[in-house]
């Protein structure tokens, strides 16, 4: 049997940025045939933030800067930048390269690339960063999730336009000699590729994704806990992709884990795809005292269909 290699990485800091423009359910009532009552009761969303000229790379940079400033971190230590996004400014260059430039790191040796696993992107990117740090070549990774979904949202389709918003979140990871185990489980089911497509506009089969999401949330959390011998008491917080409050509540119920263990902010921001986990994680880290050595679990799903979970040590 293959021996599983457990990663070891330290969470140094987190940050986030959301645009100031607010799109409320009441605003949407004026655009499509919907109501605050329908949206809130079906999704848990009240408002979302919409970029006004900011590009994905601008938001990614501002989230990174927030993480750097919070820790008084020396940005010149960063030697790896990964951006999880499916709404980059261009097909190429990557958002990561733009962030390198905006941080003034262009003269330094920094590996930069984007990761596209849609809404699971931040879980995937955290895994890639962690493997690269553990490979020994890199020592400081800036991992960002950043999206401008409003550019691809069809504001004539009430089935989708009520869900999505814009924003970015960031996390700095370092290789460490401390004992900070990390583990990742990633998967995909390509035959469901057309269940949600982000092309000119977002098109999706909402009900199909809903059922799928509840199942993979439950299975992914179960798997990462089982593989690492974790009990509920070992977990400080679960940070789920914020797609729909009902998906999170249903998964919590099936897992028999108190909903209080899940950090939820979907009411304010809606679904910001790859940005939702790092935004929520930063809000959690900024509000709660750090429970040293307890575990944080990220869990996500998205277009692909892709899904996965990450376990990191606080
Ligand atoms: N306002 C009022 N009525 C609406 C709206 C709306 N905004 N949207 C749909 N309806 C209507 C439908 O037309 C339908 O009417 P009908 O019965 O007369 O045909 C009725 O409400 C029920 O529609 P459903 O689609 O069955 O509603 P459901 O309870 O499934 O909720 C929702 C829809 C919120 C989209 C849900 O299915 C969901 O959240 N799915 C997951 C979607 C998701 O997470 N996508 C993103 C994943 S990937 C990523 O994150 C980028």
Image: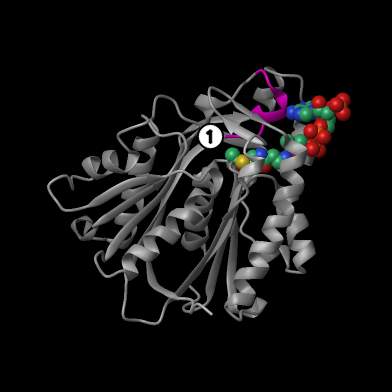
> Does residue 119 lie above or below 75 as drawn?
above
Q: In this view of the protein, which residue sits in the foreground, 285 or 100?
A: 100
Q: Residue at x 50, y 77 (%)?
A: 2
Give the secondary structure at mark 1. Answer: strand
Quadrant holding ligand 1? top right
Image location (x, y in percent) of residue 213: 70, 50
Residue 265: image x %, image y %? 61, 49
Q: Is residue 79 magenta?
A: no
Q: Which residue is mark 1?
A: 49
| Residue 30 x %, y % | 69, 17
Q: Could you say which quadrant of the image residue 257 lies in?
A: bottom right
In the picture, which quadrant includes the N terminus? bottom right
Q: Residue at x 18, y 45 (%)?
A: 104
For the question of whether residue 270 can be seen, the reply is: no
Which residue is rendered at x = 70% and y = 54% of the image? 248
Q: Which residues are magenta?
A: 156-164
Q: Is residue 10 left or right of residue 259?
A: left
């Amino acid at each position: 049997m293959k021996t599983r290699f457990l990663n070891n990485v330290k969470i140094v800091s987190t940050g986030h940025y959301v645009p100031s423009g607010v799109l409320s359910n009441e605003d949407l009532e004026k655009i499509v045939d919907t109501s605050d009552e329908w949206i809130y009761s079906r999704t848990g969303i009240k408002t979302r933030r919409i970029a006004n000229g900011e590009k994905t790379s601008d938001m990614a940079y501002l989230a990174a800067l927030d993480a750097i400033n919070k820790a008084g971190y020396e940005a010149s230590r960063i030697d790896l930048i990964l951006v999880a996004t499916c709404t980059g400014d261009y097909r190429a260059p990557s958002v990561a390269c733009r962030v390198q430039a905006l941080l003034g790191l262009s003269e330094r040796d920094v590996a930069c690339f984007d990761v596209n696993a849609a809404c699971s992107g931040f879980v995937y990117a955290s895994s890639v960063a962690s493997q690269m740090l553990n490979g020994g070549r890199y020592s400081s990774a800036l991992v960002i999730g950043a999206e401008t979904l409003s550019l691809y949202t069809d504001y004539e389709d009430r089935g989708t336009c009520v869900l999505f918003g814009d924003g970015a979140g960031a996390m700095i990871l370092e290789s460490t000699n401390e004992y900070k185990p990390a583990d990742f489980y990633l998967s995909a089911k390509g035959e469901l590729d057309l269940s949600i497509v982000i092309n000119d506009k977002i098109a999706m089969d909402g009900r199909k994704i809903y059922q799928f999401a509840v199942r993979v949330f439950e299975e992914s959390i179960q798997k990462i806990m089982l593989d690492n011998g974790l009990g509920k008491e070992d977990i400080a917080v679960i940070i789920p992709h914020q797609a729909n409050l009902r998906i999170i509540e249903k998964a919590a119920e099936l897992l028999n884990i108190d909903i209080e263990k899940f950090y939820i902010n979907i009411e304010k921001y809606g679904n910001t795809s790859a940005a939702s986990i790092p935004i929520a994680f930063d809000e959690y880290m900024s509000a709660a005292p750090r429970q040293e050595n307890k575990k944080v679990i990220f869990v996500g799903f998205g277009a692909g269909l892709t899904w996965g979970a990450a376990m990191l040590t606080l």
